[in-house]
Image: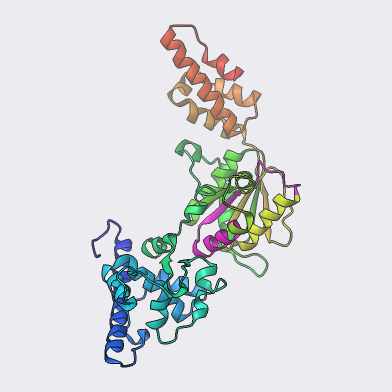
Amino acid sequence: MNNPTTNPQENNNLINLNQHALAVCQNLEQYLASVKNQTPIESFTSLPQLPSHPTLAKLCTVFNLSPFDRYILLLCVAIELEPYARILCAEIHGNERLAYATPFVAYKTFPDATWSAFNPDSPLIEWQLIELKTEQVFTQSLIKINPGILLYLLCDSFNDPQLQDIIKPVSINSRHLFIPLSHQQIVSQIVEIWSRSTEFFTENSLVQLCGDDKRAKTAIAVGAASSSGTDIQKISLYWLVTILNSPAGSLNQETFIKLYSRFALLTNNILLIDCDDINLKEPTELKLLNLILEKSLQPIIILSNTRLNLGDRSTVTIDIPPLTANEQGTLWQIHLEETAAELGEYIDTLTNQFNLPATAIESACLHSLASMESSIKTNTDFDLKTALWDN
């Protein structure tokens, strides 16, 4: 399975994992030979040293995997990548229908094996790195690597299908990425905060952005992540509470926190937690927020209308100032596009009369331009200045 991928790093990962898979196959062959010849099995760790796989090494370190845990994981990888591994497993079982990894195969083919690796509180099971489908005969139960973990080893990035409706990439239209000077200064402040780790404030401490303009706060967060060269993902606390409280939902708070803990350990992305639409006076919602913060290892930006008391967590709170008249004027021009030139100094009249956030300016422009387009098609009178003023 050595077909090159379009991504060089993914191709290197695949080649590296194939080498590990072939080493596992060699180990299975050695076991079969030892059974046939009645000789002791050689240690898997005595096989030729393989090139390091950084993501595999991180998995072992983060979840404190033993050498046997690592072997079980690689046995499951071999089943996924090398058809020959399935043939060898069936031969070890003496049953062609058992062409998959099992506790029996893992235990028999590794010299320092222990059955405790399959306990519910073992790292592989507790963190759902593997899936153990318990059968009537436990030792013949199917072991599979979690698909998200396999893709993590192949792609160097972790995405959990169970969390994809909760933790989402932050997408923002390019025209919304205009960050006025006063807000650019906040972006620089956040980046500076992240770059300065002290005894009392570390890079994974909280930054809290307060104010009524969600668009502005989100643009600042995206700008800070972009300046740091890091991806940013978002959790809407309101949406999360809705999902967890849904009678038809399959995800409860305990399961979510466990899945989120694994996600936090395997990702370095900045996390944006949107608390604007939640009633944080409710103790259950505050408890959920604090549980997320407790499990988080990455930098976090919280969006909230008012300042939140987040207990002992080191927090820098920044109040987002309203746009200046000049900054509002620039936004009017961006959203009005070529029609802005026709308005001349009328844009100054708008900024002097109204003190609007970015979302309100965009809404007024979109509605007025749509009305203007409609009037052109119907050949009716239309005054853009009046429409902008009224909208």
**Does 306 sit left or right of 223 as displayed?**
right
Residue 81 placement (x, y as % from top left)? 30, 66
| Residue sitting at x 42%, y 68% | 143
Segment tinted magenta in the rendering? 256-282
Instruction: Say how the picture is coloured.
Output: rainbow
Residue 270 within the magenta-colored segment of the rendering: yes
**Does 13 sit left or right of 209 as displayed?**
left
Quadrant assignment, res 276: top right
Image height of 127 relative to 190, above or below: below
Quadrant assignment, res 56: bottom left
Image height of 386 relative to 212, above or below: above
The answer to whether residue 263 of the structure is visible from this angle is: yes
| Residue placed most toward the observer, 304 or 132 | 132
Image quarter where the N terminus lies is bottom left
| Residue placed most toward the observer, 91 or 361 | 91
Q: Which residue lies furthest to the left in this view?
A: 3
| Residue sitting at x 62%, y 65% | 202
Residue 106 within the magenta-colored segment of the rendering: no
| Residue placed most toward the observer, 256 or 138 | 138
Q: Which residue lies furthest to the top in this view?
A: 380
Residue 266 placement (x, y as % from top left)? 49, 64
